[in-house]
Amino acid sequence: MALRNILTKEQPGLYKQCRPVTKFDERLHQLLDDMKETLLSANGVGLAAPQVGVLRRAVLVIETNVPEGEEEFIYELINPEILETEGEQDGPEGCLSVPGEYGLVKRPMRVKVRAQDRDGNWFEAEGEGLTARCFCHEIDHLNGIVFTSKVERMLTQEELENWAGEED
Ligand code: NI
């Protein structure tokens, strides 16, 4: 595994439409393994292939909503599609490609997705809260959309800390 460089918001690659993954081969597995290492090393909750310069439809999302005592795990979503959404949440959102900046973005509270795993098998997954937000955010990346284009407004550091306080 190897760390990959994360593109920042100035780089045009972040604003391009990504193509579907068609080969579920060793090269894809290498990409996913590298993305995992890069995501964990950057302390993020999600990462999309275009953020490491690969214009293919693959994302990682960490499921942080797990019962007490269970391990968090990482969804590998290849060619993901949103099947259903429910409810709404309004809260702070950030991105590894936009370091240190956070803004308020409205997202659904619950999201059901359909995607392929690294071997090409289709599966469905449901996320709530942060995971639902993350599914939407990462799939947006595959369509060249960065959250800064969806913010109601950006937050100051102090506002961000207040939001974090309210969630506790
Ligand atoms: Ni992002």
Image (cartoon, rainbow, N blue to C red):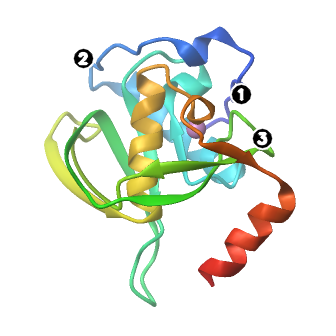
- The 10 Å Cα crowd at callout 1, few under 14, some 14 to 19, many 20 or more, is few
- From what the image shows, is residue 29 above or below residue 157? above
- Could you tell which of marks 3 and 1 lies nearer the N-terminus? 1
Instruction: Please state, as top left, top right, bottom left or bottom right, where the C terminus lies in the image.
Output: bottom right
Kind of residue at disc 1: Asn
- Could you tell which of marks 2 and 1 lies nearer the N-terminus? 1
Q: Between 29 and 51, which is closer to the camera in this rendering?
A: 51
SS state under label 2? loop
**Quarter of the rendering containing residue 67:** bottom left
* Horizontal and vertical percent position of residue 60: 45, 44
> Badge 1 is on which residue?
5
Tell me the tag on residue 135: none
* Horizontal and vertical percent position of residue 19: 34, 13
The reply to whether residue 30 is visible in this rendering is no
Q: Is residue 138 left or right of residue 43?
A: left
Q: CA distance from mark 2 to mark 1?
A: 24 Å
* Horizontal and vertical percent position of residue 12: 64, 9
> Badge 2 is on which residue?
22
